[in-house]
Image (cartoon, rainbow, N blue to C red):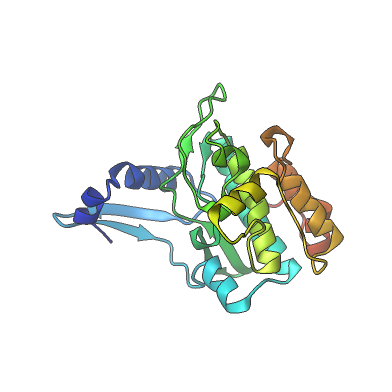
C-alpha cells in the first residue's frame, strides 16, 4: 500500500505511474508480477507477486557473498529480464540488490526485477535519456558525467551486481563520493583472486567505459563463466 499523502509530498505520481505501467504490460519470468492495482481515498494498493525470499540485498547481508554457481543463476535471471525490457524499449536505470527480489519456484529460487519507478522508454530511433538517477555504487560513467545514456547503464549495473554477488561489496567503493566517482570514471576495477578467471573476464566485458563496447546481455548469459557454473542448463533454449 502506498499512502496518497506520501505520493503528493514526494512528487511520486510519475514514479508510481511508470512502475505500474511497466509491470502490468511487461510479463517475464524475471520480472516481479503486478497482478492488480486499485486506489481508495487514502491509498494506492498494489497486488504483487509474493517474494518469500526477501531481497537480494538481505541475502547478501546475511551471507556476505554467493558461491559462483548461485551468483550465475541469479545473474542470468536478472540479465534476461533486463534484455526483455530493452527489447521492448525500456531501460530500468536503478538496478541494485534492494530491487531484486527472491521468489521460490518448483525448480529453485528465482531472482526477479522489481521497483520500476526510474525506468524510462527509449525511442525507436535510439534516442538517449538525460535524467540523473540510480544509486551511486551502481552508476555508470556516463551517468556520473551526466551524459546521455541508454540501455548501456543497465549492462554496466549488471557488472557491478555480479562483482557484489561474488565479493560481498560493490567494485568502486571508496572513502567518499568524489573518490568513488573517480574510480567509476577510470574503471578502477580490482577483482579479488577469490573470483574465478572466467568470472573476472565477464566483469571486464560488462564494466567497460564506453557503452557500445559493453557485452550485450544476450551474449553475457552465454559467456563461458555462466556455462562453467551452470553446465546442466541449456542456455540457448531456456526461456528469455
Residue 166 horizontal/vertical position (percent): 71, 66
Task: List the single residue furthest toward the right.
Answer: 197
Up the image or down, 160 lies above or below 150; here it is below
Name the side, left or right, on which 150 lies relative to 206.
Answer: left
Q: Residue at x 52, y 35 (%)?
A: 146
Q: Is residue 163 visible?
A: yes
| Residue 134 image point, x, y percent | 49, 48
Q: From this view, report whether residue 162 is shown above or below residue 79.
A: below
Residue 204 image position (x, y, % from top left)? 77, 49
Front residue of 165/35: it is 165
Q: Based on the displayed image, in which of its 4 quarters is residue 131 positioned?
A: top left
**In screen coordinates, is 88 left or right of 40?**
right
Examine the rendered structure and indicate whether residue 228 appears above or below residue 80. Answer: below
Q: Report how many numbered discs are placed on residues in the image.
A: 0
The residue depicted at 84 percent of the width and 53 percent of the height is 224
Q: Considering the image in quadrants, where does the N terminus appear?
A: bottom left
Determine the image quadrant of residue 73: bottom right
Residue nearer the viewer, 14 or 106: 14
Name the residue furthest bottom: 62
Residue beneath the point at 71% across and 43% down:
218
Which residue reaches farthest left?
41
The residue depicted at 75 percent of the width and 44 percent of the height is 219
Residue 29 visible to an observer of this rendering: no
Amino acid at each position: 500500500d502506498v499512502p496518497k499523502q506520501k505520493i503528493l509530498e514526494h512528487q511520486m505520481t510519475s514514479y508510481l505511474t511508470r512502475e505500474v505501467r511497466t509491470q502490468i504490460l511487461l510479463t517475464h519470468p524475471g520480472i516481479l508480477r503486478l497482478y492488480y492495482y486499485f486506489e481508495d481515498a487514502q491509498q494506492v494498493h498494489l497486488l504483487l507477486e509474493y517474494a518469500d525470499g526477501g531481497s537480494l540485498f538481505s541475502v547478501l547481508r546475511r551471507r556476505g557473498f554467493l558461491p559462483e554457481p548461485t551468483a550465475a543463476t541469479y545473474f542470468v535471471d536478472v540479465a534476461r529480464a533486463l534484455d526483455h525490457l530493452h527489447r521492448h524499449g525500456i531501460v530500468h536505470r536503478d538496478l541494485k540488490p534492494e530491487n531484486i527480489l527472491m521468489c521460490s519456484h518448483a525448480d529453485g529460487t528465482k531472482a526477479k526485477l522489481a521497483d520500476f519507478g526510474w525506468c524510462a522508454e527509449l525511442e525507436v530511433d535510439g534516442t538517449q535519456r538525460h535524467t540523473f538517477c540510480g544509486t551511486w555504487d551502481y552508476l555508470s560513467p556516463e551517468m556520473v558525467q551526466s551524459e546521455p545514456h541508454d540501455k548501456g547503464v543497465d549492462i554496466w549495473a549488471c557488472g557491478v551486481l555480479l562483482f557484489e554477488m561474488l565479493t560481498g561489496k560493490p567494485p568502486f567503493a571508496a572513502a567518499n563520493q568524489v573518490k568513488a566517482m573517480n574510480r567509476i570514471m577510470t574503471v578502477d576495477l580490482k577483482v579479488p583472486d577469490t573470483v574465478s578467471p572466467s568470472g573476472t573476464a565477464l566483469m571486464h566485458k560488462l564494466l567497460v567505459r564506453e557503452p557500445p563496447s559493453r557485452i550485450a546481455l544476450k551474449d553475457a548469459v552465454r559467456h563461458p563463466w555462466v556455462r562453467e557454473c551452470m553446465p546442466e542448463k541449456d542456455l540457448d533454449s531456456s526461456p528469455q
